[in-house]
Amino acid sequence: CIVIREFSLCKAEWEFRAFYCKGKLTALSQYCYRQYFEEVVRKREEVERIIKDFFEKVEIPYESCVCDLYLTWNNDKAK
C-alpha cells in the first residue's frame, strides 16, 4: 500500500514510528531516533497513552505493519 499526501512542515519531535504485529502494537519509537527531545520525555506517558488509544480505536486493515504517526498539539493537548 502506498499513501501519498500533501507535504507539510512537521516538528521532528512529534513524529513516531509504530510497529504493529499480529494485531497488536508491539513497539513505538521516535522517528528521529538520533535526536533527544526534552519535551517528548516530559510528555512520554501522555504520548504512549494517546498512541495506544489510537490503535485500540482504529481498525488496522493489516495483521502486521509499520505506521508513521505525527502528533499535533493544541493548547498543550494532543489531537
Image: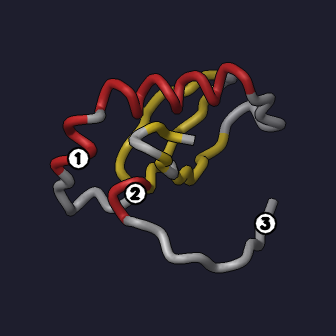
- Determine which residue is flagged by label 1: 39
Specify few, some or many for label 3: CA neighbours under 10 Å numbering under 14, 14-19, or 20 or more.
Answer: few
Instruction: Give the secondary structure at mark 3.
Output: loop
Marking on residue 31: 2
Using the rendered view, name the quadrant where residue 42 is placed.
Answer: top left
Q: Residue sitting at 51 percent across and 29 percent down?
A: 50
Quarter residue 14 falls in: bottom left
Position in image of residue 72 (x %, y %): 51, 51
**Can you give x and y, in whole percent of width and height, for residue 7 in the image?**
64, 79
**Disc nearest the viewer among 1 and 3:** 1
Q: Amino acid at mark 2?
A: Tyr
**Residue type, mark 1 in image:** Glu
* Tag count: 3
Q: Residue at x 57, y 41 (%)?
A: 79
Is 22 placed left or right of 10 in the picture?
A: right
Q: Nearer the viewer, residue 46 or 4?
A: 46
Above or below residue 60? Residue 69 is: below
Residue that label 3 marks: 2
How far is disc 3 from disc 2 in space, using C-alphas?
19 Å
